[in-house]
Image (cartoon, grey):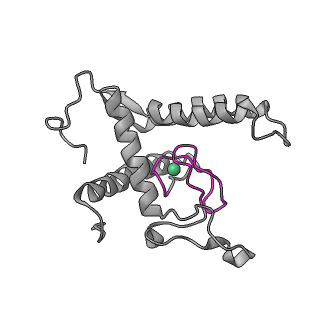
Amino acid sequence: MHLQTGLSEDDNRLIAAFHAKRKLFDDYIRVRALGLFTCPGCGYPTLHRRGDFSICEVCFWEDDGEDDETTSVVADALTAFGGVSGPNGQLTLTQNRLNIGRQLEENAAATHGVPDLEPASVLKTLDVFKTKREKIEEKLSPDAQITDPAWQELKNLREDLKRALAVSTHFPYDPSTTPKLF
Ligand SMILES: [Zn+2]
C-alpha cells in the first residue's frame, strides 16, 4: 500500500520497514500518552512537537511539517516566510527514510545485530544520549566557533547513537539466512 514508483525492490522493503517501525512506536507512545511524536524521517519517537523545525537526533531530519503526503517532493516550507528552500535542502522525505534505514541496518549488521525495535529499549537509549548531548552542549557558548571541538563531539555522538540503536542477535548475521524483519 506504500509502494512508490521509481524505487528499487530493496528501497520499497526499507520504506515498508519504516512504516512498520513507525506504527510500532506510534502505538506505544499513544497507549502510554508519552507526549512524543515519531519522526517522519526515521520513525523513531524523537519529537516533542510536530512541525516546529526541531531536528531529529537520530536522522537529522528537520521537522518542517512534511509527512506521508509529500514524501517525494523537496519541501519549500520556508517560502511562506520569505525563504527560498526547505530546511532539508534537496533531500526528499523518501530519500531521508532510505538513507537512515540503510545506515541503521548497516550499523547493526556490523556488530552482528539488527536495528532495535523494542520501544522501551529505544526510549532508554534516546534518553541516555539526550543527557550526553546536553552535557556537550553546555560546553558550547552561543558564539562558539566552528572549530570548537565540542561540535565534533556532537557529531561523533550522533554517529554513536545510530550504532547504539541496534541489538545483538547472538549469532553471526547472515543476510541470506536471517529472516527479514518486515
Ligand atoms: Zn528522525
Q: Position of residue 67 (x, y in %)?
A: 49, 66
**Residue lying furthest top in this view?**
170
Range of residues picked out in magenta: 40-63
Asked where in the image residue 117 lies, by quadrant, the reply is: top left
Residue 53 falls within the magenta-colored stretch? yes
Q: Residue furthest left?
A: 177
Q: Nearer the viewer, residue 84 or 34?
A: 84
Q: Residue at x 67, y 74 (%)?
A: 84
Q: In terms of depth relative to the viewer, which is nearer, 85 or 126?
A: 85
The x and y percentages for residue 142 are: 84, 42
Which quadrant holds the N terminus? Answer: bottom left
Residue in view at x 58 percent, y 63 percent? 89
Residue placed furthest toward the front: 147
In-image side of 124 versus 141 (left or right) = left
Q: Residue at left 22%, top 24%? A: 172
The kind of secondary structure the magenta stretch mainly shows is loop
